[in-house]
Image (tube, rainbow, N blue to C red):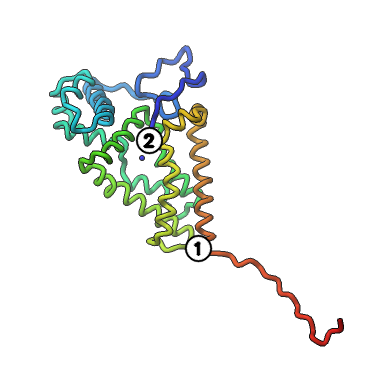
Amino acid sequence: MRKPSSPPPASTAPADDEPPCQPGWRNLFGHCVARKPRSDGEQSRERLLRSAIRLFAEQGYARTSTRELAQAAGANAAAISYYFGDKAGLYRAAFAEQSSDPLGNIALFDQPHFTLRQTLQGFYAQMLAPMQQGERARDVMRLWCREMLEPTGLWAREIEQNIRPEHEAFARVLARHLGADADSDDMHRLAFSIASLALQHMVGAEVVHVLRPQLMATPQAADTWLSRMVDYGLAMAEVERTRLHPVTPFQPSIPQKDQHEEV
């Protein structure tokens, strides 16, 4: 693992000496993400990719034509062949926009010297990182949902190549911290539950914007969400630790009365 249109609070308006934020440059929290100038070729490829993410998310792969993709990007159909090979190649590039190397993600939370808190900080940081990468991360998440509903095979590959190794690594790390069997259903259940805190935030960001926009309206919002998720994840892990290793309450011994003791 997003970005519904964010309200323009006064704190996010550009100062007089700042250039206006370009379309697609705002992250989930409404803040402008600076980007380096691109060459003409890079800009053409970027426009195609941006249009593809939006159109494929809205219409699906089968109902989106190469002509429509090119027109939306202000390019010609030959540009799709030049940069991506064909429509399928453009779709793969759009789908992979938020994919990252699982080994790099795992390294952020699986370190032998990490405390459980540090493990959760790294885990949530890599899950929430796409939220900082511009408005189109929302459309990428919609594209992923579209792929789940109308599969082309990319979602199944994403699960096997990226999601599975990260999930299994996270379950092993939790087991190490809690002194449990790494392959137990309990550890996998806990790993899914802890991850769901970030997944709900990624998938349900638009709901948050509508119901409680101030939760995502300040420069500190991302850090606050990350900090709270770590606390909530720790609480879930501690519940599982207690279940796995229950502590028997201390029972003070009560001296027995001598049967010959006078009443």
| Figure check: 187 above or below 134 | below
Q: Nearer the viewer, mark 1 or mark 2?
A: 1
Identify the secondary structure beneath mark 1. Answer: helix
Please give the label number shown on residue 208: none
Residue at image mark 2: 130
The image quarter in which residue 260 lies = bottom right
Identify the secondary structure beneath mark 2. Answer: helix
Q: Is residue 260 left or right of residue 120?
A: right
Q: Quadrant of the C terminus?
A: bottom right
Q: Is residue 106 left or right of residue 209?
A: left
Residue drawn at x 66%, y 68% is 250
Name the one closer to the observer, 74 or 204.
Answer: 204
The image quarter in which residue 149 lies = top left
Name the one closer to the observer, 175 or 258.
Answer: 258
Q: Is residue 232 left or right of residue 130?
A: right
Residue 111: x %, y % from top left: 43, 52
Residue 253: x %, y % from top left: 71, 74
- Whichever of callouts 1 and 2 sits on the residue coming sooner in the sequence is 2
Residue 207: x %, y % from top left: 44, 32
Quick one: which residue is furthest to the bottom in this view? 260
Residue 114: x %, y % from top left: 47, 52
The amino acid type, in three-letter code, at marker 2 is: Pro
Please give the label number shown on residue 244: 1
Quick one: which residue is furthest to the front in this view? 263
Residue drawn at x 50%, y 45% is 230
Residue drawn at x 40%, y 57% is 172
The image quarter in which residue 138 lies = top left
Marks 1/2: CA–CA distance? 34 Å
Q: Residues within 10 Å of mark 2 (few under 14, many from 20)?
A: many
Q: Is residue 208 left or right of residue 155?
A: right
